[in-house]
Amino acid sequence: MLETFETVSKAIADPSRARILKLLEGGELCVCQITAVLNLAPATVSKHLAALKIAGLLQQRRDGKWVYYRLAERDLNPYARSFLDLIRTSLHDDPTTAEDRRMLGLVNAVPLQTLCDQGRAALPLNAKAPTTCCGEPT
């Protein structure tokens, strides 16, 4: 049981993973959408998503060439629900997650195919301000 607890706690300890969980509170997102909001390399985002899925915090579904992630609806890990509740009630006034929510609004305005093909280049020019994590420029 301690190993299971450790898996979940390590998964949410990473700031980028906490940001992903906060993004997914609004519903499922395609990997392209998450990548565009976080402004990270697709391989990096995939690594974070895999860690969150292994920890039982996320579920995925495939729709053609797109893969969508959402917060786990089933208790795949006995500690996942408690950690998701903690994330859900935290970071509401954090400037990084506020910027992520703003960027998600812009990302959601772009057709998915365009976003997946062009990434952040598909966003309006004024939307591409550098994101920050933990008060530091990324």
Image: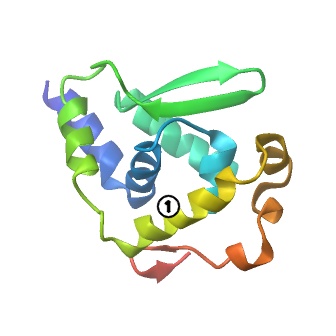
Tell me: residue 34, above or below residue 6: below
Residue 129 x %, y %: 65, 79
Residue 111 x %, y %: 79, 46
Horizontal side, residue 117 vs residue 33: left or right:
right
Q: Quadrant of residue 74?
A: top left
| Colouring of the image | rainbow
Task: Give the quadrant of the C terminus.
Answer: bottom right
What's the residue at 76%, 42% (across, down)?
112
Residue ranking furthest to the left: 2
Task: Give the quadrant of the N terminus.
Answer: top left
Res 41 visible: no
Q: Quadrant of residue 127?
A: bottom right
Horizontal side, residue 12 vs residue 82: left or right:
right
Q: What residue does disc 1 label? A: 101
Tell me: residue 22, above or below residue 83: below
Amino acid on which the number 1 mark rests in the picture: Arg
Res 129 visible: yes
Which of these two is toward me, 131 or 92? 92
Question: Is label 1 in a helix, a strand or a loop?
Answer: helix
Residue 110 x %, y %: 76, 52
Q: Quadrant of residue 67?
A: top right
Horizontal side, residue 79 vs residue 14: left or right:
left
Q: Neighbour class for label 1 at 10 Å: few (<14), some, many (≥20)?
A: some
What's the residue at 77%, 21% (across, down)?
64
What's the residue at 58%, 57% (across, down)?
104
